[in-house]
Image (cartoon, rainbow, N blue to C red):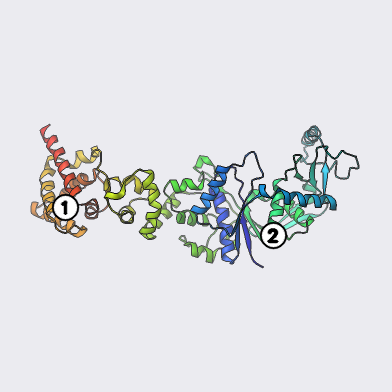
Amino acid sequence: MKIKTRFAPSPTGYLHVGGARTALYSWLFARHHQGEFVLRIEDTDLERSTQPAIEAIMDGMNWLNLAWDEGPYFQTKRFDRYNDVIDQMLEQGTAYKCYCSKERLENLRETQMANNEKPRYDGHCRDSHEQHADDEPCVVRFRNPQDGSVIFDDQIRGPIEFSNLELDDLIIRRTDGSPTYNFCVVVDDWDMGITHVIRGEDHINNTPRQINILKAIGAQVPVYAHVSMILGDDSKKLSKRHGAVGVMQYRDDGYLPEALLNYLVRLGWSHGDQEIFSVDEMKALFDLDAVSKSASAFNTEKLQWLNHHYINTLPPEYIATHLQWHIEQANIDTRTGPELAKLVTLLGERCKTLKEIAETCRYFYEEYEALDADAAKKHLRPVARQPLEVVRDKLRALTEWNAESVHNAIQATADELEVGMGKVGMPLRVAVTGAGQSPALDVTVEAIGQSRSVARIDRALAYIAEREAN
């Protein structure tokens, strides 16, 4: 049997982390078993489905590199197919027309709730022989079995059983002729040959209804696996309050897709004590047996730790392709400074996100507007004038410009003036970067360049002279 999974989001909002994890698990299961992965857009909710949401889902999937083998299929393009199946069910008696008015159904619900009964359709039209005009408004309901149970072996949770008495006769076509979500899902899974349905635990109650419909239309019942929800670090359901917006927000915040995928795969699945997984390792190792049935808590610090790891272990040239977007967002012209791959090696150790790199790299490419007040006050004092003048002259005189020659110039200045390296290094750092922190000084000065470094030292010396004058 060829394994075939699907990810089937409703385009009523962004692709959030819970959806992304479900997509990842479905994708990995298919890849692990050399199967196929289908993307299906479940857009039957015509009022809430939007084109921007569809694009956000596709953007998120593409950014995470979760490539699909089939699709994207859209349910709104398949209404004729659904209605053909419903018409066949009406002929076979596995579905029936229901003419109950809205008022009758509301009164029924109120009575049941007043009697502490579970609100459900009472089957009034199930075996009715009343005559109705062809154009009289009606819905179509599925004739759910009235005895026995639906039992399925959830691949994460084990056997789950629902009594058919708990399930009422589900509406499968509305009065306007549009088929309903639970019915469309069934026909899609059948037509697309889905063997394994991996989805969130909020769908558990839909599963027995869908299994009964699958059996009624003579379709193969897939294997089901329901993944637990993701909680915030306060143990409450993950929501916008926790910053749980769309997946692309993590791109915007400076995370790499590798970091988010690695984080999400471990949010409910484990392989021994291993924390770091390449995508190839995930595909080789992932299976449903190791997925936990317990809820998982989202931890942003852990995600940052992983992101920092990938920034410093993946090839800088690759990281630079993702950094480029953040540099453009910050409106930084990189033509007058180091290549972005070099910038990654310069700032990667200090920065946990690509956004942080973009926010702190400007002095490599542009003149700083003003010196950091605290750093200048502390390190650009009159006592720093001589070390800066000496190191400036040595840097200006260099015929070879590299980190080693820069380091030697700084060391020679300290030796000549018989002072510690810090007495030269800290004023120099503030002079060339405008701030009190930077990567190692020799590589920083080298990356800024000879003429600009010398010009910035002159600027710092002018600041000191003004300070002395006042």
Q: Residue 61 placed where, x, y %?
A: 53, 53
Question: Spatial distance from mark 2 to mark 1, Cα to Cα?
Answer: 70 Å
Side (left or right) of 102 relative to 301: right
Residue 159: in sight, yes or no?
no
Q: Residue 105 placed where, x, y %?
A: 79, 36
Q: Quadrant of the C terminus?
A: top left
Residue closest to the eye, 248 or 230:
248
Residue closest to the eye, 73 or 267:
73
Side (left or right) of 2 relative to 144: left
Residue 69, picture quadrant: bottom right
Side (left or right) of 368 relative to 273: left
Badge 2 density bin: few <14, some 14–19, many ≥20, Cα 10 Å: some
Tell me the residue at 8%/51% (across/down): 417
Badge 1 density bin: few <14, some 14–19, many ≥20, Cα 10 Å: some
Residue 421's disc is: 1
Q: Hey, what amino acid is under mark 2? A: Pro
Tell me the residue at 71%/53% (across/down): 186
Residue hosting label 2: 222
Q: Earlier in the sequence, mark 2 or mark 1?
A: 2
Residue 388's disc is: none
Image height of 287 relative to 241, above or below: below
Q: How many marks?
A: 2
Q: Residue 269 placed where, x, y %?
A: 55, 58
Q: Residue 452 placed where, x, y %?
A: 20, 47
Residue 232: in sight, yes or no?
yes
Q: Quadrant of the N terminus?
A: bottom right
Residue closest to the eye, 58 or 424:
58
Q: Element under label 1?
A: helix
Tell me the residue at 49%/56% (across/down): 261
